[in-house]
Amino acid sequence: MEQKLRWGILATGGIAASFASDLLATGLVVTAAGSRSSDKAQAFADRFGIANAHGSYEALVADPEVDIIYVATPHPQHADAAILALEAGKHVLVEKAFTLNAGEAKALADLARKKDLVLMEAMWTRFLPHMIRIHEIIDSGLIGRVRSVQAEHRQFLPTDPSHRLNAPELGGGALLDLGIYPVSFAFDILGAPDAVSAMARFTGTGVDAEIAVNMRHAGDAMSASVSALDCAGPNMAVIYGEKGRIEIDSVWYTPTMFKVVDYAGKLIETYDGRVANRGMQFQAFEMERLIASGARSSSRMPIAETVAIMETLDAIRAQIGLSYPGETPAA
């Protein structure tokens, strides 16, 4: 019987807990957890029944019982953690936003290529059932040529100035935590933009509280998004085609439902993509498929596209005047 691939989780915060829960609930194997705190690593391992707890990231990536590392640290630590794992010969899934800037993203992509390892951004939305079905509908021509995409991502998140979301030195703000979703969505549906325009409102700590991004894509298709961390929204999305549109219910980037209507508003199709858990296992399925097949990049989330997305986020930050103290200069 072929041995299952084994996951190690690097960092033990909330997103790591969701990931571990979804993987274990769907039959995947998590053999180790790592933290800079031995107590936190052990508590996480005990919570999820994970065999090995490591009190350093170095010990985690050196674990011979781990094949894939999931990086769940704050944004500024993504690049260093991924380098550590790649240098140790592990395949790596890195939380989004992938890095602080495109320079870091390019360096990681180059290292993964050199090491012949799978490196993928954990943009889990792209692998959800409803998103797979949406691409099938678009490819079928049912709604005609896509002309526009609109999406929002507004949440009311902690306002404590010391929280990482409000700390510039930790890559805080709406863009990297929330805005990455609709920007990546626009890439997914329309491809890379050839023009970008952005405006933002800032917090007292100097991070973006709200950001609006408009982009022009191939064939003059347009995308528009608003993301905010200090006000909640219904978080819906719409894909507009020449023959109809796809209306994605709240919350559009999680397992959810959508409907397809024609240009006159007549209902054509409904789809229910809800699952029993958060749905983070689907990206893990893709990682394991890539490794088993010998492929090194996913067609749903290519590493080259991740780099292009980071280049776009850099351009957005330049327009709104947002920088992160201590970040490695963009290449």
Image (cartoon, grey):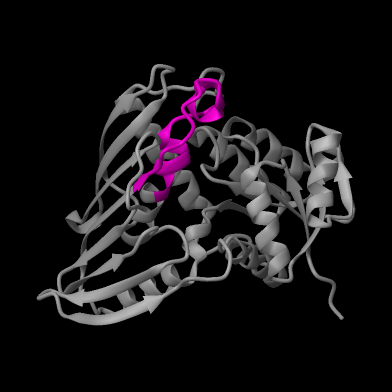
Vertically, is 170 above or below 266? above
State which region is magenta: 153-181
Q: Is residue 113 visible?
A: no
Residue shown at 80% from the left, 42% from the top: 34
Q: Quadrant of the rendered structure where residue 221 is? A: bottom left
- List x then y, in percent, for residue 185: 38, 55
Give left or right: position of 194 versus 127. left
Give left or right: position of 221 versus 115. left
Q: Quadrant of the N terminus?
A: bottom right
Give left or right: position of 237 versus 263. right
Vertically, is 61 above or below 103? below
- List x then y, in percent, for residue 110: 61, 44
Q: Nearer the viewer, residue 19 or 290?
A: 19
User: Residue 162 in magenta?
Assistant: yes
Residue shown at 31% from the left, 35% from the top: 211
User: Residue 77 in magenta?
Assistant: no
- List x then y, in percent, for residue 225: 28, 46
Give left or right: position of 259 versus 169. left
Q: Quadrant of the rendered structure where residue 79 is? A: top right
Q: Quadrant of the rendered structure where residue 138 is? A: bottom left
Residue shown at 51% from the left, 42% from the top: 97
